[in-house]
Image (spheres, grey):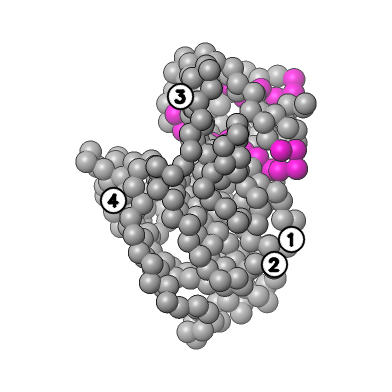
Amino acid sequence: MSIRPIKSIVSAQPTIEGAGVKLRRAFGFGKTTEFDPFLLFDDFRNESPEDFLAGFPWHPHRGIETITYVLAGTVNHGDSLGNSGTLGSGDVQWMTAGSGILHQEMPKGDQRGRMHGFQLWANLPSSLKMSTPRYQDISGSEIPEVTDDDGTRVRIVCGSFWGKTGPVEGIAADPSYLDVWIPPGKRKILPVETTRHAFAYVFEGTGTFRGASSPQSVQTEKVGDASNVSVEETGNRSLVLFDSGDEVVVQAGDAGIRFLLVSGKPIEEPVAWYGPIVMNTEEQLRQAYAELHNGTFIKYRS
């Protein structure tokens, strides 16, 4: 068994998307190789409704999958296939845009006005770029949760872990998407397949991720991989990118630690990317936007 070294620890940076939603972006719209098959990761956590109520009005996607995981508040959604619904606390939507879809996502706060969720974009291989769009809407009650003897809890959105398998299926990159809570002071070794790229995104508590030689602590406003830096408190929005190996080692701090552990098999294909459309070549990208302008973008309708 080999512990995964840590490539870097970065802080999610403030940005604005949609019609004015304030969020934090951990990676996206840049170099894709280290995160392949994943393209983008956003943390939309707000306690002020004016920072998110404008939402994400109608917009297109092609060639990717978008994964929305809601922790607090709700997200109302609709699309060009006639689907509509509401994601609530604990729910997940795994949307395969395939050949093209128009949709909207409109967040609404909980009773205290809070909204918290994540959106991850995953690439599609060339063979599935123009596939039929589909949704997998998963209610929180369908997501299995396993608890270890020391109190560690893992919700399994996608993939298999500790003998349980998540409800999302049929995904090209064969990803694993786990919501992990480790109690205060506990040390945990978590398996991750060697062939996958993997990252952890910390969103509650404190902790230390240990590399092959020295510990790497999660930190809020720091970019880099310096050892033994100070640990910030709850909500630090730190992303830990791992190198190759088959284990991740985590030491929880005094408040415990909660993070997403995400991994997937690299697609290793060329990426041509502009906005919400990701193809393999610039010509395919130009064709997609030409179709968007001339009204032939949508290949499947309800």
Secondary structure of residue under mark 3? strand
Residue 271 in the image: state x and y as whole percent: 68, 62
Q: Distance between the residues labelled 1 and 4?
A: 37 Å
Circle 4: residue type: Lys
Q: Which amino acid does label 2 sit on?
A: Ser
Q: Which residue is drawn at 51% across and 84% down?
A: 296
First along the sequence among labels 3 and 4: 4
Q: Earlier in the sequence, mark 3 or mark 2?
A: 2
Q: Which of marks 1 and 4 is nearer the N terminus?
A: 4
The image position of residue 297, as x and y in percent, is: 52, 79
Q: Mark 4 points at which residue?
A: 108
Q: Is residue 50 above or below residue 127?
A: above
Circles 1 and 4 in contact, beta carbons < 8 Å:
no
Residue under pointer 2:
126
- Majority secondary structure in the magenta region: strand
Which residue type does callout 3 highlight? Gly
For residue 205, which numbered disc appears in the image?
Answer: 3
Point 56% across, 81% down: residue: 290
Residue 212 is a magenta residue = yes
**Which residue is outermost to the right?**
1
Residues drawn in magenta? 193-213
Is residue 60 visible from the viewing direction of this image? yes
Q: What element carries label 1?
A: loop
Q: Which of marks 1 and 2 is in front?
A: 2
Which is more foreground, mark 3 or mark 2? 2
Badge 3: how crowded within 10 Å, few (<14), some, or many (20+)? Answer: many
Per the model, the C-alpha gap separating discs 3 and 4 is 25 Å
Where residue 50 sits in the image (x, y, percent)?
A: 26, 49
In front of the other: 261 or 170: 170
Q: Answer few, some or many: residues within 10 Å of disc 2's Cα (few below 14, many 20 plus, some between 14 and 19).
A: some
Q: Which residue is drawn at 60% across and 43% down?
A: 159
